Amino acid sequence: MNGVPILLATSNPHKVNEVSAILGPLGYQVLGLDSLDRVPPEPVEDADTFEGNARLKAIGYARETGRRCLADDSGLEVDALGGQPGVHSARWAGVSGTRDQRDAANNAKLLDAMKDVLDRDRTARFVCCMCLADPDGSIVAESRGTFDGVIARAPRGAHGFGYDPLLVLPEGVTSAELAPAEKNRRSHRSEATRAIVKRIP
């Protein structure tokens, strides 16, 4: 595929495909970390915001590889919990193991934390922040996307991962009950990708 190359700071083929579906038709070639001969060490994500962690990854990988790099940081913000789990979404329950094991522990912790919260106060959203950086460390563009809903009282749906079974969308289905293609079309990552395209000089 021809086009302007952008390194996406992930080895997840689903993320690469999702971003490629948006950027490819616009003339960009999206490559994952697995396309590199040597994958640099992952930058330490110690910022306290999604925006900060996306910047750390984009700048770190861009400098290490000498390529323009697009990175994202994403997670769940729950209003009744003061924005938690936020940047700690992936390992909020502090459990190691497989992704499925971590997801199950995180979901159980969320349900327990929300058990006494009224329906009207269960608002939440998935957030994705993106940053595009050049090899000299300069930030080219940034964006933010959200996917809003409320926290369910029990998990529903077989698609997706993470907190998808617990975020109920305005039409009454959870993110995990959406077909993958529909979720990708509407997701926080899709919104952030479409927004950052408009900001690339």
Image (tube, helix red, strand yellow):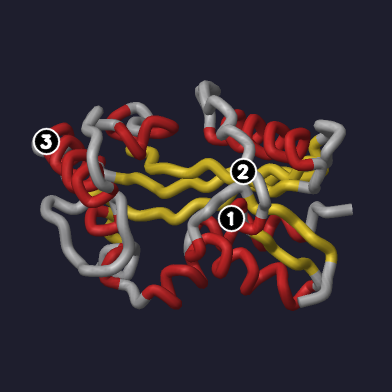
- Which circle's residue, 2 or 1, is located before the other in the chain? 1
Q: What element carries label 2?
A: loop
Image height of 59 relative to 197, above or below: above
Local crowd size for mark 3, using a 10 Å CA cut-off: few (<14), some (14–19), many (≥20): few
Contact check, label 2 and label 1, Cβ < 8 Å: yes
Q: What element carries label 1?
A: helix
Q: Position of residue 128 (x, y in %)?
A: 53, 47
Q: Where is residue 190 in the image (x, y as percent from the top left)?
A: 56, 62
Q: How far apart are marks 3 and 2 (CA)?
A: 39 Å
The residue that appears at 84% across and 64% down in the rendered structure is: 4
Q: Quadrant of residue 63?
A: top right
**Residue at 89% across, 53% down:** 201
Q: Which of marks 1 and 3 is nearer the N terminus?
A: 1
* Separation of residues labelled 2 and 1 (CA atoms): 7 Å
Residue at the spot of label 2: 39
**Marks 1 and 3 in Cβ contact (< 8 Å):** no
Q: In which quarter of the image is residue 39?
A: top right
16 vs 131: above or below: below
What residue type is disc 3 on? Asp
Indicate left or right for 71 with 160 as reference: right
Kind of element beneath mark 3: helix
Nearest to viewer (mark 1 / mark 3): 1
The answer to whether 180 is drawn above or below residue 107 in the figure is: below
- In the rendered picture of this protein, how many numbered marks are placed on residues? 3
Image vertical order of residue 75 relative to residue 85, above or below:
below
Mark 3 — residue? 112
Q: Which of 114 and 52 is in front in this view?
A: 52
Could you tell me residue 2's position as x and y percent?
Answer: 82, 75
Q: Which amino acid does label 1 sit on?
A: Asp
Circle 2: residue type: Val
What mark, if any, has residue 34 been given in the picture? 1
Rate crowding at label 2 as few (under 14), some (14 to 19) or many (20 or more) other CA atoms within 10 Å: few
